[in-house]
Image: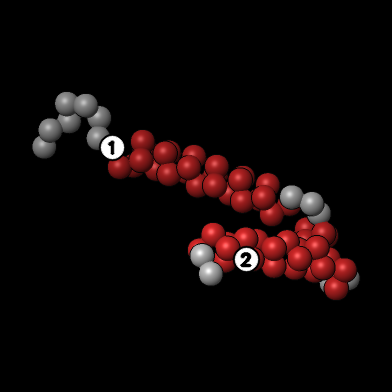
Amino acid sequence: MTPRGLLWIAFALSAAVELLLPAAETSLPWWHRTPAFHAAYGLVGCMLIVVVAKALGRYWLQRPEGDDD
C-alpha cells in the first residue's frame, strides 16, 4: 500500500472516531462539548507564549544599543 493510501485510511478512521465519539461520551465537562473550544484555547495559548517571549526578550535579554562592557 502506498503512503498516500495509508494517509487516506488514517484520515477516514480519524473522521469516523470523531463522528462516533460524541455519541459515546455523555458526562464530559462543558469545554469538551463546546465546538472549537480546544482550537480557540490553543490559539490564545500560542499568542500568549509569543507575547510573553517577545516581552522577555525585549526587557530582560537585550541590551540597549551602545552598552559595551
* Callout in the foreground (1, 2): 2
Can residue 32 be seen here? The reply is: yes
Quadrant location of residue 5?
bottom right
Residue 34 as seen in the image, left or right of residue 56: right
Residue under circle 1? 62
Q: Residue at x 11, y 37 (%)?
A: 69
Categorize mark 2 by other alpha carbons within 10 Å: few (<14), some (14-19), many (20+). few
Residue under circle 2? 10
Disc 2, SS: helix
Image coordinates of residue 11 in percent, x first then y, are: 65, 61
Disc 1, SS: loop
Can residue 29 be seen here? The reply is: no
In the image, which disc is placed on residue 36? none
Residue 20 as seen in the image, left or right of residue 48: right
Image coordinates of residue 37 in percent, x first then y, are: 73, 52
Categorize mark 1 by other alpha carbons within 10 Å: few (<14), some (14-19), many (20+). few
Amino acid under label 1?
Answer: Gln
Q: Residue at x 55, y 42 (%)?
A: 47
Image coordinates of residue 21 in percent, x first then y, are: 80, 69
Amino acid under label 2?
Answer: Ala
Q: Which colouring convention does the figure follow?
A: secondary structure
Residue 63 as seen in the image, left or right of residue 22: left
Q: Residue at x 67, y 50 (%)?
A: 39
Residue 54 as seen in the image, left or right of residue 46: left
Answer with mark 1 or mark 2, whichever residue precedes in sequence.
2
The answer to whether residue 67 is above or below residue 25 is: above
Q: Residue at x 61, y 45 (%)?
A: 43
The answer to whether residue 45 is above or below residue 26 is: above
